[in-house]
Amino acid sequence: MSGPGVIFKRCGCRDADRRRLEQSCPQLGERGHGTWYFHCSATNLLGGRERARRGGYPSQAAARQARDEFLSAGAADRTAQGWTVERWLRHWLDSRTSIRATTRFHYTRDVDAVLIPYLGRYRLADLDAQLLRTVFAAIADTRNTKGRPQSAAAMSHLRTTLRAALNLAVKEGVLDCNPARHIEIKGYQQPHAKVWTDARVESWEQTGVHPAVAVWTADQLAEFLGSVNDDPLFAL
């Protein structure tokens, strides 16, 4: 077999004990049964050697071409195609050696609690603006550890963490641009209190709609306190 690495065929058949037959399947020589894989090693972004295994190719020629393209690519391109987001986030955290302890704590919390569970399985090359917008919209619909809706501030901090991690990927040539720049923040906004003016009272009486949080005017408060003092139920 020409070129470095190994090209092989395997399938998903199982024996009577439900163990995968893979390359020992007796039907593997039949046309259309199983798919082709390649297995090789190449230099990664950090200068070390790492093994790569890719599969699902319909023919031996397709697997060989994919292997050759993988080996001819630069280390940065191989990282984009081969590293998961989880692996990159761990690498990014390890490389942040000069940040404050509190900053590291918040970064690590974002990475472990949210980013890896929602994005960790994707390859770096899979990341684009549409995917990140979809994932962040799903995160915004969840509840935080206190059972409250995700706040806009928390979502913004999450985006900041991801942008910082992917900025390093851009700097290292792994990504051409940072897709996290296009994330739209959607989170729970604390309602602002509005003064319960005569106009708002009149509108409420007509429509039944009122502010989520309303604040009495001084005259309204005085009227309420006066009514309480006049009520025999509250008399001392």
Image: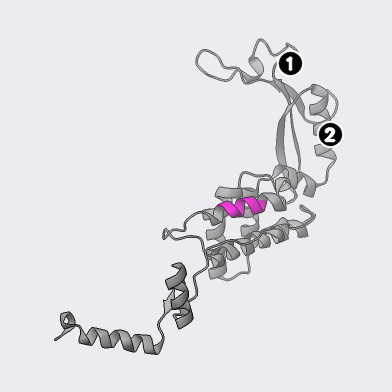
| Residue, disc 1 | 32
- Specify the quadrant of the image occupied by residue 101: bottom right
Q: Residue at x 69, y 14 (%)?
A: 28
Q: Secondary structure at mark 1?
A: loop
Q: What's the magenta region?
A: 132-138
Q: Quadrant of the N terminus?
A: top right
Mark 2 Cα shell of 10 Å, populated few (<14), some (14-19), many (≥20): some
Please say if 213 is above or below 9: below
Please say if 187 is above or below 65: below
Identify the mark at residue 68; answer none if there is no mark: 2
| Relative image position of residue 140 (x, y in whole percent) | 55, 57
Q: Is residue 197 visible?
A: no
- For the residues carrying marks 1 and 2, which lies nearer the camera in this image? 1
Q: Amino acid at mark 1?
A: Gly
Tell me which secondary structure the magenta stretch mostly adopts: helix
| Relative image position of residue 167 (x, y in whole percent) | 72, 61
